[in-house]
Image (tube, grey):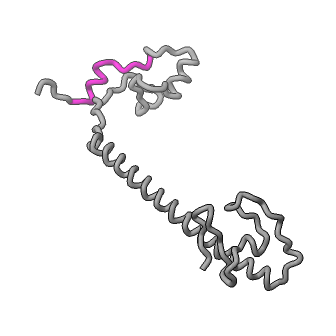
Amino acid sequence: MVGYAQQPSEHIYSVFTSTPLFDRYNVPNRTRGTMNKKPSFESMTVDELWLLYEELSQVLSVRLTSEKRELEKRLSQLQRENKSRASESVVATSTPRERRHYPRVLPKYRNPNEPSETWSGRGKTPRWLAAALKTGHTIDEFAIRDAEANKGTSRRRGA
């Protein structure tokens, strides 16, 4: 079986012969720190090329599998760390704040042409009021009088 070169002194051996793969095909050897000449694929037979392909495929398969295992270990470690951080933050903020209750705001201005259109005076000015102000009207002309504002509501106070 083709071994994965863990130590610099180890070689990857051919499956079919006991010679190191790098020596047999004149492939660069990282373990020796030297670069041999580029392999001459043109001078190799189809059978030799096929053997080289199979051996390289096996070496790559072993290396990719081991690298995948290492990455999966690292990923699981990061996920465990992330879960522990998330659980710490959940303990600190386990109950979300409730939204503050705002009192209902009564309308202050009404469109005389369309009485259902009102405005409380908060937020963006409605189009009907902006158009009327551009034509020369004043905002006081659209104000709802206190008697009219309290007529539609029947609130108890101090109950």
* Residue bounds of the magenta highlight: 141-154
Q: Quadrant of residue 26?
A: bottom right
Residue occupying image coordinates x 41% and y 33%:
116
Left-right relation of 1 to 151: right
Percent x, y of residue 69: 51, 65
- The answer to whether residue 131 is above or below residue 44 is above
Q: How many numbered marks are there?
A: 0
Left-right relation of 98 to 3: left
Left-right relation of 148 to 129: left
- The answer to whether residue 63 is above or below residue 142 is below
Left-right relation of 29 to 5: right
Percent x, y of residue 51: 74, 81
Q: Quadrant of the C terminus?
A: top left
- Residue most toward the left? 159
Residue 78 versus residue 59: which sits nearer the camera? Answer: 59
Residue 98 versus residue 105: which sits nearer the camera? Answer: 98
Percent x, y of residue 139: 46, 16
Residue occupying image coordinates x 53% and y 23%:
130
Residue occupying image coordinates x 44% and y 26%:
123
Percent x, y of residue 67: 56, 63
- The answer to whether residue 42 is above or below residue 28 is below
Residue 33 versus residue 53: which sits nearer the camera? Answer: 33
Whether 93 is among the magenta residues is: no
- The answer to whether residue 143 is above or below residue 21 is above
Q: Quadrant of residue 145?
A: top left
Residue occupying image coordinates x 26% and y 24%:
150
Whether 150 is among the magenta residues is: yes
Q: Quadrant of the N terminus?
A: bottom right
